[in-house]
Every structure is written in structure tokens, then in C-alpha cells.
Image: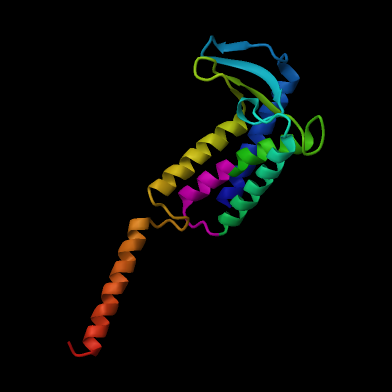
Amino acid sequence: MIVASLAAIVLAADQFVKHLTIENLPKAEAVPVLGEFLQLYYIRNSGAAFSIGSSMTWIFTIAMAVVVGVIVWKTFEVRSRLWAVVLGCLLGGVLGNLADRLLREPGFAVGHVVDMISMPWMLPAIFNVADIFIVSGMISVALLVVLGMRLDGTRERDHAKSAQDSAADGHEDAAASAGI
């Protein structure tokens, strides 16, 4: 439920901001929010980050659909609230951009993603709400994996210690039954 709820909230927020962008912002014109620090800049991106692969939009659509499938499949293994939050946010972000690919112009599976957030001092990229959740979600997944947090909420070292304890118990049981 956590994964589905968060995914729905992120997807709705992303699509709402994109709707507001389309309805209210001029195309390809910087609108300062906090001077040079934060600007709104409405573009439609046919490619991935930095418009890479703009002639292969359909490949991104397929890749995002596969990612959605993997996240949904892994969700059935999740017993950790932390993993549920991370996967819910990641799923919502991927669904936000996938919805653009499927439903926006120029057509089904090749739609252009609506981007509007620009921080020119940091990177020469323009991104959207979904991108924020995708990037932060992937960073969180990497951290959870590095920290050894399993989908069931246990840690790798806890699992390893449990396996060692079980092995030690097995040796003690074997020794006791052998009369040692």
C-alpha cells in the first residue's frame, strides 16, 4: 500500500506541475524564480538527460516500462517501510515520465517529456518533478544496497550473523549427538 500510495501521489504531483507548465509558462524562455539560482524554463524533451538519444524516444519508453515492471515485481518482496517509500517514490517518478512518453505529442510511445526546472549555476540541465524522484530514488536504492539493507528489512550483516549462528548451532547439535 505504501508503494502504490506514494507512486500515485508522485505521479499526480508531476502531472499537475506539467499541466501548470503547459498552461502558464512561455516556451523556451527563462522565468526567474530565485534569480540565477532557480528558474522555470519550459521545454519538451524527446531524449533522456541532456537530450541524449532524442532520435530514440521509443527505446526510453520500453526501458521505462521494464523498470515499472521490475519495481512492481520487487514490491511483492518488500517488508521494509524504508524500501517501500523509496520504491514508491521511484515508481511514481518513472510513471510520470512514462505517461509523457505514452500520451504526449508527437504520439504514442514517442511523446516528449515536459521539463521546466532549471538551475543553471549547478548543471546545464532542465528537469521536472518526476526526474527529481527518479534521481533521489536511485541514489536511495544505491545507499540501501551499500548499507546492506534487504527488501525484507534485515541487513546483510544480520543475515550473515544469523547464518553463522545457525551453522554454529548445527555444529553443537552434531557434537552433542556424537557424544562430544
The answer to which quarter of the image holds residue 57 is top right
Q: Position of residue 137 (x, y in %)?
A: 52, 40
Measured along the vertical axis of the image, is residue 178 above or below residue 45?
A: below
Residue 82 is a magenta residue = yes
Nearer to me, 75 or 110:
110
The answer to which quarter of the image holds residue 117 is top right
Display coloring: rainbow
Q: Residue at horizontal 64%, vertical 43%?
A: 8
Q: Residue at horizontal 51%, vertical 40%?
A: 138
In the displayed structure, does residue 78 sit left or right of residue 96?
left
Measured along the vertical axis of the image, is residue 174 above or below residue 124?
A: below
In the displayed structure, does residue 110 sit left or right of residue 160?
right
Q: Position of residue 123 (x, y in %)?
A: 53, 20
Q: Position of residue 113 (x, y in %)?
A: 70, 30
Q: Residue at horizontal 81%, vertical 38%?
A: 108
Residue 9 in sight in this render: no
> What are the residue bounds of the magenta stretch?
77-90
Residue 161 in sight in this render: yes
Q: Main secondary structure of the magenta part?
A: helix
What count of labels does the image hold?
Answer: 0
The answer to which quarter of the image holds residue 58 is top right
Which quadrant: the C terminus? Answer: bottom left
Nearer to me, 165 or 25:
165
